[in-house]
Amino acid sequence: MEEEESNSFWTKLFKKNHEQILEQEITEDAYEELKSLLMRAKPEIKGSDLIVHLPKADIILKPGKLLVKARTKKDAEKVLRNIHHYSQPPGLWPAYGLTYSIRKEKGRIS
């Protein structure tokens, strides 16, 4: 009995946290809509990929695919369900677990 308890302690201590990835195939039209929607969140752009970093997940939009990476499947599903709320004013985003990147744009004078 003691061995099982110590075994589970060490298992928890050294357990690797595997990210959960939800992948969704999307059409060309859906890609364009999601792209315009996610651009409001000031994403990181790498080639043709848009990456939005949220507190509990990352949204990666590629042509033909939408990926949501999170620590748990529950968090990934929540973000996937709530992506459409980016169409609302930014002040409401935190209520749905969404956020926007706060980055200074280089070379821009306002």
Image (cartoon, rainbow, N blue to C red):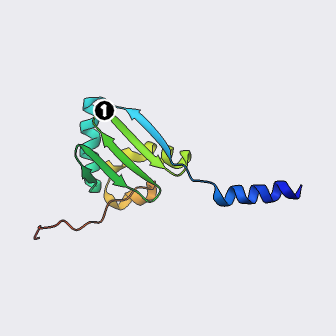
Q: Position of residue 110 (x, y in %)?
A: 11, 70
Instruction: Say whether residue 79 is visible.
Output: no
- In the image, residue 30 sits, relative to residue 1, either above or below, namely above
Residue visible at 38% across and 57% down in the picture: 93
Residue 56: x %, y % from top left: 47, 56
Horizontal side of 48 relative to 79 (left or right) equals left
Along the horizontal axis of the image, is 65 left or right of 55?
left
Q: Measuring 45% from the left and 42% from the top, which residue is drawn there?
A: 81
Q: In the current view of this chain or complex, which residue is farthest to the bottom?
A: 109
Give residue 4's quadrant in the image.
bottom right
Q: Residues within 10 Å of mark 1 (few under 14, many from 20)?
A: few
Residue 104, compared with residue 97, is above or below; it is: below
Q: Disc 1 designates what residue?
A: 64
40 to 67, vertically: above or below? below
Q: Residue 23, percent across and down?
A: 43, 36
Q: Is residue 69 visible?
A: yes
The residue lying at 47 percent from left, 42 percent from top is 21
Query: Quarter of the image holding residue 61?
Result: top left
The residue closer to the viewer here, 18 or 98, is 18
- Tell me where residue 85 appears, x and y as whole percent: 37, 48
Question: In the displayed structure, would residue 52 be above or below residue 31?
Answer: below
Q: Residue lying farthest top?
A: 27
Return the residue nearer the eye: 53 or 11.
Answer: 11
How many numbered circles does the render carry?
A: 1
Tell me the element at label 1: loop
- Name the amino acid type tagged 1: Gly
Q: Residue drawn at (40%, 51%), measured in percent from left and top?
A: 58
Q: Foreground: 38 or 92?
A: 38
Quadrant the N terminus occupies: bottom right
